[in-house]
Image (cartoon, grey):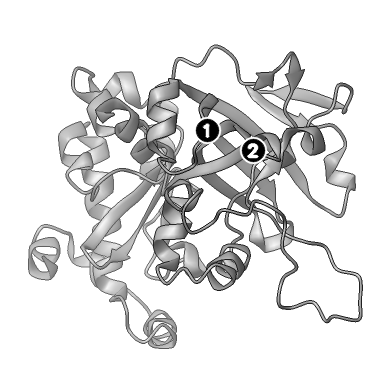
Amino acid sequence: MFLTILLNTPASASECSAQDNKYAESWDNHYSPEVARAFGLKIQKLVKEKDLKGIFSLVNGELQSGPRKRSLLHKSFDEVFDAAWIDLVVSQEPACSPVGWRGFMLGHGQVWYNKTEAGWNILSLNGAAVERPAAKSARWHFDKRLLHPLCFSRPWLSGDNFEEFADAYNISDLQKLLRAPGLFMGSKISDYAPIRPSWCSSAEPCETISLVTELDRCKSDDFPFEERDGTVWITGSADRGNAEHQYNVLKELDAASCSKLAPDIGADCLESHLLRVDDYMGNSMGWDISFGIYGIFDLPEVGPSILPLLFFQNKNDALNYLDQD
């Protein structure tokens, strides 16, 4: 692939500086600055030619952000990307060095790409026309009350909260718990009470952590919220510890599909949705975004509660899963 890119790229593709090469060394030479620049030029060439198929041939699997491959089967390039997007992408000189851990970009973030285990790939295509799942509403109402954005348990960026439950319930496969917690509910995890994490000393008050959220503890008839571009936000949440919280419903699941994701729980699934849940971490951390299926179950001795059932790498993978279900 290295030679193919270089042979099909202008000689200027190798015009990377000594500083670029030194920066690559700081990343243990994970990438070659010259090849990175050549890959960026290759993307720009395909954009100029409006080669939709060629662009998506550089995507391994599904995009982290951008349209699903199957949504493009009967679309032309101009139905997906507009002229302003093209101008942005082709006007920025491809870089020899990445934007830190985020990878390489074109068009001030319209295109993100990087070297992965599968080689050089486009990771995100922002600003493209994307499909909008047919959800009845961005909000999740249950029993005529709106669910709070903090109702939905999910792995922290560190994964420490789920790791605590793996340790507490002798779950050896942490990755499976992080991916499909519903499979452990009612089997390995039969006590749904919050636990005190190991990082708390016994002598001090400490906030407990939980995988299961009782509805009576997280929903409110009058919490202040607003709807922004199809998402439910806690109003004024930017002033609360420099954090912002939001969610939106992407798709509704039927009860049978929901129950299948928690087969040992011993209770019927009352409602289930695929959600996007966001927390703003502040500063350089940006947004922590997750895509997951949640279900409401009437748990014995607990009552109606929200359970995390299945998480996905990105929205496209989640929608593909639901299409196949």
Provide the residue designation for mark 2: 300
> Residue 245: horizontal and vertical position, in percent?
73, 41
Direction from residue 50 to residue 94 in the image, left or right = right
Q: Nearer the viewer, residue 94 or 136?
A: 136
Position of residue 33 measured from the top left corner of the image (x, y, whole percent): 32, 74
**Front one among 311 and 43:** 311
Q: Which residue is mark 1?
A: 267
Which residue occupies 23% across, 19% down? 75
Please say if the residues under marks 1 and 2 sit with CB atoms less than 8 Å apart: yes
Quadrant of the rendering where the C terminus is positioned: top left
Q: Is residue 83 left or right of residue 168?
A: left
Mark 1 residue crowding within 10 angstroms, few (<14) / some (14–19) / many (20+): some
Front residue (pair 1, 159): 159
Q: Where residue 318 appears, x then y in whole percent?
A: 38, 37
At label 2, which amino acid type do we have? Pro
Secondary structure category for the residue under label 2:
loop
Q: Is residue 161 above or below residue 145?
A: below
Answer left or right for 70 relative to 230. Answer: left
Q: CA distance from mark 1 to mark 2?
A: 8 Å
Residue 51 showing in the rendered view? no
Counting labels gives: 2
Does dot 1 land on a helix, a strand or a loop?
loop
Sequence-wise, the earlier of marks 1 and 2 is 1
Instruction: Using the image as rendered, state which of residue 70 and residue 317 is in the foreground.
Output: 317
Q: Is residue 8 left or right of residue 133?
A: left
Q: Residue at x 69, y 43 (%)?
A: 213
Task: Check the image and report above or below for 6 versus 293.
Answer: below
Tell me which amino acid carries mark 1: Ala
User: Tag on residue 6?
Assistant: none
